[in-house]
Image: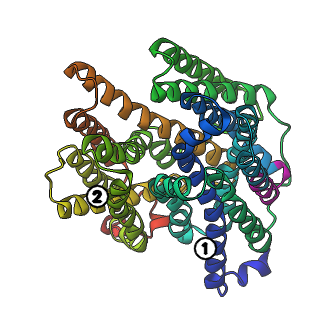
Amino acid sequence: MTVARTTEEPSEASFGRQSRIIAFVVAVSFFMQILDGTIVTTSLPQMAKTFGVEPVSMSIGITVYLLTMAAFVPLAGWAGDRYGARRVFLASITIFTVASLFCGLSGSLAEFILARAVQGVGSALMTPVGRIIVLKSARKSDLVHAMSMITWPALTAPVIGPVLGSFITTYLSWHWNFLINIPIGIIGLGLVLRFVPDQREEKVARLDLLGFVQSAAGLTFLLAGLEFVVQGTTGLAPSIGLIAAGVVFSVIATRHFMRVDAPLLDLSAFKVQTFAMSTLSAGTASRVAINATPFLIPLLFQVGFGRTAIDAGTYLLFYFAGNLGMKAITTQMLRIFGFRNVLVVNGLISSASIGACGFLSPSTPDLLIYCLLFIAGLSRSMNFTALNTLGFADIHAAQRSSASTLSSMLQQVSLLLGVAVAATMLNLSRTIHGGETLSLADFRWAFLVIGLIGAISALRFVSLPHDAGAEVSRHKMKASSKP
C-alpha cells in the first residue's frame, strides 16, 4: 500500500485521464439507454399499423419497460458488489442491446411487449452500476468533470430523441428506432472491455430478498401510478390507488432497511446532508422542474403555436445547444462560486427561464425565443450537473453502491413526477377554462407552476454550508481561512 501511495501523485494526470475515459465509456451506454426511451414514442402509430392494433394499445410497451426497470433497479447496487461492477455493466449492455434487436424484429404486440420487458431489466442495472464504476474510478478532484460527462445523455437525449425518431420513422421505418441501438451497444461493449477495470467488493452480504421485494413493489407501484397519470387513460382513482400502494410499500421497505443488519440498501447515505438535499428533498423538486420542460416545450410549439414537428425541432436545437454549451464552463463555475451559490442563483435563473416560456406566443420574435431557450438550456445543464455531483461529494466508499441505487430510484420518480405535474396542470387549466383543446393560457399556467417549484427548490439550498462539497468543487471560501 505504501509503494502505491508514493507513486500516486506523479500519475495524477494519467489517473485523471483514465477516469475521464471511463466516464465517457459509461456515457455512451447511458446515451443509448435514454435515447431509446425518448425515440420510441414517435413511432408508436406506425408500429400499431404493423401489429394491427389501435395506437393507444402501444402505450403498454412503454409501461412494461418502465415497470420491469423499476422492479430491478433496487437490485443493481448489490449485484455490482456481488458479481463485479464491470461484469454486471457488461451484462446490462448485452441484455439491453439484444432486447433492442428483438424489439426491432417484433412481428406482433405480444413479441414487442416481451422484448421491452427484457430491455427494462438491462436498463435497470445499467444506470446505477455505471455510476458506481465512475465513482470508484474518479478522484474527488475529477468528480465534477466525470459526473458532467455521464449526465449529458440525460440532458441531450430527451431533446434530440423525438426529432431523430420522427426522421427515422418518416424516411426509414420504425424498426430502425430500435436497431440503431445495435451498433451503439456493440461499441459500448468494446469500450467497456478495453477501458473499464474489474472492480469487486471482497465481502458481500447475502441478498436481502425481503427488502428487494418490498422496495421493488414500492417503486413499481409508484411509477405505475405516475405513468397512468401522464397517460390519462385509466382514470384518477386507479392512479391514486397505485401511488398510495407505492408509498405504503416504500415506507415498509424503509423500516425494514433500518432494522436488519445487512439491508439491500444502506440508508445511511441520507444522513449526509449534501446527498439528502440533492437527491431527496430539494433535489427531487428541482428535478421535477428539470424533467418537465422537455415535455412542455415541444407541446407548446406544436399544440400551442400550431407549428410542425420540424419547426419545433428547430427551436429545440437552441435548447439543446444551451445544454451542451454549459458543459465547457461547469467545472470553473463551481470552483469560483461553489455548489451552494450555483444551486441557488442558477436555480433561480433556470426557474425564471421556465416561467418565461409560458408567456411566449406565435407573435414572439424567433430571436427572442431562441435566446430564451438557449438560456433555459444553459441553466438546466448547470443545475443537473451540480445536483448529481454534489450528491456524491461526501459519500464514503462503503456507501457508494447503495447511494447510486437510491439516487437512480429517486431520479426515476422525479422524471415521471415532473411530466405528471406538467400534464396535470395542463389538464386542470383546460378544465377550469372549459376548453376542449389546450390553449396558450393552459401552457402559461403549467410553465408558471413548474417555474415556481424550481424557484422554491433553489431557495432551499440556502441552508447548505458555504463550503458544501468544496473538496470536489475546489471552491475556497474566505471564511475557511479564518481560525
Q: Main secondary structure of the magenta part?
A: helix
Q: Who's the residue at 15% across and 54% down the image?
A: 364
| Figure quadrant of the C terminus | bottom left
Q: Magenta includes 90?
A: yes
Q: Is residue 463 visible?
A: no
| Residue 6 sits above or below residue 197 on the image | below
Question: What residue would you read off at disc 1?
Answer: 20
Q: Quadrant of residue 263?
A: top right
Span of residues in magenta = 82-93
The tag earlier along the polypeptide, 2 or 1, is 1
Q: Secondary structure at mark 1?
A: helix
Residue at the image position 69 percent from the left and 51 percent from the top:
126
Marks 2 and 1, Cα distance to the nearest angstrom?
Answer: 29 Å
Q: Residues within 10 Å of mark 2 (few under 14, many from 20)?
A: many
Q: Assess disc 1: are there few (<14), some (14-19) or many (≥20) residues with their C-alpha within 10 Å of its C-alpha.
A: many
- Indicate the amino acid at tag 1: Arg
Residue 238 seen: yes
Q: Residue 235, relative to residue 343: is it above or below?
A: above
Residue 331 in the image: state x and y as whole percent. Answer: 43, 71
Residue 163 place in picture, x, y as percent: 46, 56
Position of 261 relative to 234 (above/below): below
120 in the magenta segment = no
The residue type indicated by label 2 comes to Leu
The answer to whether residue 86 is left or right of residue 418 is: right
The residue beneath circle 2 is 373
Furthest-bottom residue in this view: 10
On residue 279, the disc is none
Between label 2 and label 1, give the one nearer the viewer.
Answer: 2
Nearest the eye: 10 or 164: 164
Circles 2 and 1 in contact, beta carbons < 8 Å: no
Tell me where residue 418 appears, x and y as whole percent.
42, 37
